[in-house]
Image (cartoon, grey):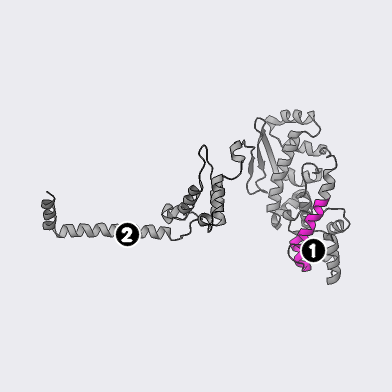
Amino acid sequence: MDVCIMIRQRLEELGLEQKDLAAAAGVTDSYISQLFSRKKLPPAPDRTDIYSRIGKFLKLPVGKLSELAEHQRMEELKKDLSETPMPLFKEVRELVLRKCTLEKRSEIRSIFEKQPFGELERLVTQKLLDVVQKVAKQELESESWLKLIAQLSGRSYEEMRVSVLEFLDMDAFDISAENCISYLDPLIDSWDIDLANFRMEIVLNRRLAPAPVRKVEFVETDASDMGGEEPGLQEFLRNPSMAGDASDEEIAFLRKLKFTGKRPAALYYYRELQNLRDPLNFRESSVAPLQKYADAANLEKQMQIHAREGAIQRWTENKASPSRRKHKSKTAR
């Protein structure tokens, strides 16, 4: 059973109509019709809220529609991988080039034109798409953001929600001119790339994106960092007496530790774990979330108070007993 069949059956059981479903999902009636007729592939579960909305409306088990949609999409993906990808629409390429900084535009254009859909063009287009899709996904629940985008592209709110769901499923191989007009054009102000290391800087429309500047870098990694976990960490994790009560956060912290040259033993990680838990290792302004004693600051204050009281008491005793001090001095001689 696929998503559409389950939704249709549930609508009949509850005596509901297709327009009721569209209203509950926040999409157009035509979009639901296209899903039912298989003209559109169900959107990716991790990129939309439509399945939770429909599932709640139809009183279905949580996650059931998402599970079916994921399976259906995997089957379609297997078919798509066997086909040769088509080059970008001319309008898409022109938009990508128009958004490029003026200093680099002619150079980038000449590279693009050497191949119909070369490596650089795919890379740039996909990264621009990734950044804009991330913004769209974050703002999917924002009615004001969707209405603003709808206004800029001349669409209704419901049409814009449908468009967003489709846009979030796009990649560089199937992006359309319509997607560019609706999203890439209004959201992207400009982009630049360093052809020596392919570092990209993407400037977004400040009205539509919370963080207007995004940077994408390709970092060279030392081969020694790619060998998996340290042997000492693996030994530490296998030893219940050392790591038996370690929390997921503490283990995640230990995994992030990097070393050059010397390789740490299991005992090192055990001691590092104890350091994380020792309240005296953290001050009030930077108490680590991993420490298990929330009263670290109070403990340190108590120690300071005791030390101060002890010093005052010794000073008082010495001031009140000068003869005693003199006696001690003679004894020492």
Q: Residues within 10 Å of mark 1 (few under 14, many from 20)?
A: few
In the picture as drawn, the residue positioned furthest to the right comes out as 37
Quadrant holding the N terminus: bottom right
2 vs 1, front mark: 2
Number of the label disc, if any, that sits on residue 23: 1
Q: Residues within 10 Å of mark 2 (few under 14, many from 20)?
A: few
**Is 146 included in the stretch rendered in magenta?**
no
Q: CA distance from mark 2 to mark 1?
A: 65 Å
The structure residue drawn at horizontal position 83% and vertical position 50%, both measured from the top left corner, is 76
Question: Vertically, is 62 above or below 207?
Answer: below
Give the image location of residue 271, x and y in percent.
46, 50
Viewer-side residue, 228 vs 241:
241
Viewer-side residue, 196 vs 166:
196
Give the residue number, with chain letter if any, for mark 2: 305
Tell me: 108 left or right of 307: right
Element under disc 1: helix
**Is 64 included in the stretch rendered in magenta?**
yes
Give the image location of residue 225, x and y in percent.
59, 40
For badge 2, the amino acid type reads Ile
Element under disc 2: helix
For badge 1, the amino acid type reads Ala
Question: Vertically, is 55 above or below 42?
Answer: below
Viewer-side residue, 46 vs 141:
46
Give the image location of residue 283, x and y in percent.
42, 53
The structure residue drawn at horizontal position 81% and vertical position 48%, both measured from the top left corner, is 77
What segment is highlighted magenta in the picture? 51-75
